[in-house]
């Protein structure tokens, strides 16, 4: 029986690294993917494959596609490399570095590392804005239902789809906002994380309230802050049994439904985004049979 990659359902670790690869030498894809199977445990090393790789292999993963074009005033977002995505989880930065180097070597020359971002837990699970992140994440069986493909799709059962985005915060803009404006942008009080009943309709909490969609739009978020120099933001990561819930939230955030744009965009913006399919585990190893292996 196939099972999910266990790292998907675990809480975010103390430290992480996100790797995104593009296709390079197409003559040795199979060999390099099989090498990756020997290194990825699905627990501390979570793996996803994107549409560019799936198309090159000539197979079909139902539900997998390219990241959608996002349109909103002043907003531009690039598609991230979407051949292979790897989330390295751990609590030792040096160990993560060496694991990253080993995996990058194993995937070469078929895959080229295009983006490498270190991430970390801040204030026991807060965004760098100071607000708690992932407050209404589903748990237990609801988390599995939201994030993992069920037995009704036997070819993909146990696998997951993941939407990723790299958001960069404008800290100067955020810090210039009043405390009330900051709280209203999120829809919660930063001091105690209580939801504000009088928050405007543009508040992020109201834009993305998962139970307010029809059908409900629950995803399992595993986002973590990133920093480089004095810049930083959020590596947004949302696992789902499909991309439907994520896309429903995204459409509402950019005002596609009612013209109201999420107030998050006043101080932060996504720079890149990508979609991946995360295969299930079979006998403790990545099951690549849907890819034809």
Image (cartoon, rainbow, N blue to C red):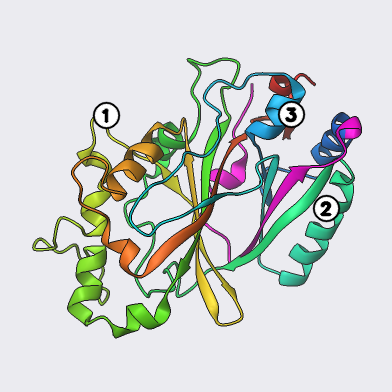
Looking at the rendered image, the disc whose residue lies closer to the viewer, 1 or 3, is: 1
Of callouts 1 and 3, the N-terminal one: 1
Of callouts 2 and 3, the N-terminal one: 2
The quadrant of the image that shows the N terminus is top right
Residue 11 point in image, percent of width and height: 51, 55
Q: Could you tell me which residue is drawn at 65 percent across and 63 percent down?
A: 117
Residues 289 and 268: in front is 268
Q: Is residue 22 magenta?
A: yes
Please state if 105 lies on the left or on the right of 148 as rendered. right
Residue matched to label 1: 215
Residue 207 point in image, percent of width and height: 24, 50
Q: Secondary structure at mark 2?
A: helix
Give the magenta range.
1-28
Question: Callout 1: 10 Å neighbours few (<14), some, many (20+)?
Answer: few
Question: Callout 3: 10 Å neighbours few (<14), some, many (20+)?
Answer: few
Q: Secondary structure at mark 3?
A: loop
Give how far apart the Cα atoms at labels 2 and 1 are.
40 Å
Are discs 1 and 3 less than 8 Å apart at CB?
no
Q: Is residue 250 magenta?
A: no
Residue 171 point in image, percent of width and height: 41, 79
Residue matched to label 2: 104
Residue 59 point in image, percent of width and height: 69, 18
């Amino acid at each position: 029986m196939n099972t999910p990659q266990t790292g998907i359902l675990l809480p975010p670790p103390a430290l992480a690294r996100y790797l995104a690869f593009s296709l390079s030498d197409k003559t040795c894809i199979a060999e390099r993917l099989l090498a990756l199977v020997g290194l990825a445990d699905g627990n501390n090393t979570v793996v996803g494959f994107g549409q560019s790789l799936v198309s090159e292999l000539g197979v079909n993963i139902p539900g997998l596609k390219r990241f959608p074009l996002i349109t909103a005033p002043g907003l531009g977002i690039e598609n991230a490399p979407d051949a292979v995505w790897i989330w390295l989880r751990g609590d030792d930065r040096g160990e993560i570095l060496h694991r990253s180097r080993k995996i990058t070597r194993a995937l070469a020359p078929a895959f080229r590392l295009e983006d490498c971002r270190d991430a970390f837990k801040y204030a026991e699970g807060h965004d760098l804005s100071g607000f708690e992140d992932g407050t209404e994440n589903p748990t237990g069986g609801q988390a599995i239902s939201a994030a993992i493909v069920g037995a009704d799709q036997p070819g993909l059962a146990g696998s997951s789809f993941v939407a990723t985005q790299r958001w960069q915060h404008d800290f100067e803009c955020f810090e210039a906002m009043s405390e009330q404006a900051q709280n209203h942008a999120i829809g919660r009080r930063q001091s105690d994380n209580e939801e504000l009943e009088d928050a405007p309709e543009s508040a992020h909490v109201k834009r993305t309230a998962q139970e307010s969609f029809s059908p409900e739009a629950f995803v399992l978020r595993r986002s973590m802050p990133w920093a480089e120099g004095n810049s930083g933001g959020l590596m947004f990561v949302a696992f789902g049994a499909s991309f439907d819930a994520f896309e429903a939230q995204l459409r509402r955030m950019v005002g596609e439904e009612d013209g109201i744009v999420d107030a998050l965009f006043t101080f932060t913006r996504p720079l890149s985004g990508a979609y991946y399919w995360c295969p299930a585990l079979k006998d403790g190893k990545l099951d690549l049979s849907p890819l034809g292996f």
